[in-house]
Amino acid sequence: MATIVPDTTDQQSQCTGSRTRNGEPWSDSFYGTVDASGNPWGVVFLIENFRGPGTYTNADIRVQLHNADNSQVYQNLGADKVTFTVERSQQTGTVDAQLTSAITGKSGVERVSGRWNCRG
């Protein structure tokens, strides 16, 4: 992601961060630009059953990438390989996720990879 964009009425970045306890949902969502078009895309990470800092894979984590009007949505499903780490602060980590098109059902069409951070 090239740049995080400021919050608007429809697009608000948020993170549960260090407030999450074991067994609770942990999430991070943010909006930014990914290419020269300057159009914002949303990225969502969701761990429904947080177990503390560590590595989460496939069924443990939901990763979604979507454009502003949701006409293009990609998410991890079934056999999509995902490795997501939450570091000790619960506000930084890494992601490497293969994503399926929610529109066409074609798997492995997008990939989200790199470091993430939030304030929460």
Image (spheres, rainbow, N blue to C red):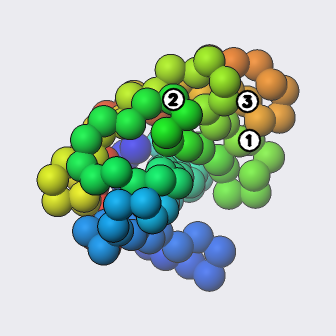
Please tell me which of labels 3 and 1 falls first in the chain.
1
The structure residue drawn at horizontal position 80% and vertical position 25%, both measured from the top left corner, is: 105
Task: Identify which residue, 88 or 37, lies in the foreground.
Answer: 88
Task: Identify which residue, 86 or 32, lies in the foreground.
Answer: 86
Which x, y percent locates residue 116?
Answer: 30, 47
Marks 1 and 3: in contact by CB < 8 Å? yes
Please, what secondary structure does the residue beneath circle 3 have?
A: strand
Mark identifier at residue 102: none
Residue 111 appears in the picture as rendered: no
Badge nearest the viewer, 2 or 1: 2
Q: Residues under labels 3 and 1: Cα distance?
A: 8 Å
Residue ranking furthest to the bottom: 9
Please, what secondary structure does the residue beneath circle 1 have?
A: loop
The residue wearing badge 2 is 58
Q: Residues under labels 2 and 1: Cα distance?
A: 21 Å
Residue 101 appears in the picture as rendered: yes
Badge nearest the viewer, 2 or 3: 2
The residue wearing badge 1 is 72
Mark identifier at residue 101: 3
